[in-house]
Image: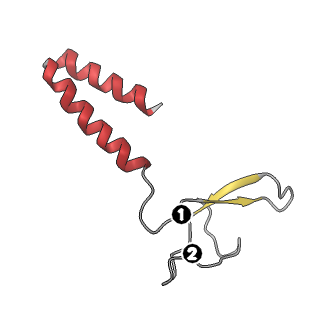
Amino acid sequence: PPIVSINEGVEIAKRFSSRESGGFVNGILDRMLAECTAPKAGTSGPTVVADQESPEMPTELTEPTEPTQDGATGASSEADSEPI
């Protein structure tokens, strides 16, 4: 989990540098986690696409389409979507 990784980074910084470096490393890694997990403006995140053989079970993710002028995402079919 990301929080455990951040804690390990902080402990390594404390061990191999000064105790104050733990707070510095914690701040950097915490900010990186927040930026990496926050949704980007204007996107709705990946879209789950169902397999045609078993429509109730999603099998792949596709990137969302670009938003239109009204802010909604454009309609797309599975053929238009690029698998991730």
Q: Amino acid at mark 2?
A: Thr
Q: Can you give x and y, in whole percent of width and height, for residue 78 in the image? A: 71, 71
Question: Left or right of 18: which side holds 72?
Answer: right
Q: Residue furthest right?
A: 53
Instruction: Please give the name of the residue rendered at 25% of the width and 38% of the height, measured from the top-left corner.
Output: 28
**Snapshot quadrant of residue 76:** bottom right
Q: Can you give x and y, in whole percent of width and height, for residue 61 in the image? A: 63, 57
Instruction: Please give the name of the residue rendered at 16% of the width and 18% of the height, measured from the top-left corner.
Output: 19
Instruction: Please give the name of the residue rendered at 14% of the width and 23% of the height, measured from the top-left corner.
Output: 20
Is 32 drawn above or below residue 78 in the view shown? above
Disc 2 to disc 1, C-alpha distance: 8 Å
Is 35 drawn above or below residue 74 in the view shown? above
Is 16 drawn above or below residue 28 in the view shown? above
* Res 17 seen here: no
* Res 11 seen here: yes
Picture quarter with the C terminus: bottom right
Is 16 drawn above or below residue 26 in the view shown? above
Q: Can you give x and y, in whole percent of width and height, for residue 73 in the image? A: 57, 75
Q: Earlier in the sequence, mark 2 or mark 1?
A: 1
Q: Label 1 crowding class (10 Å Cα cut-off): few <14, some 14-19, many 20+?
A: some
State the mark number for residue 44.
1
Q: Amino acid at mark 1?
A: Ser
Circle 2 sits on which residue?
73
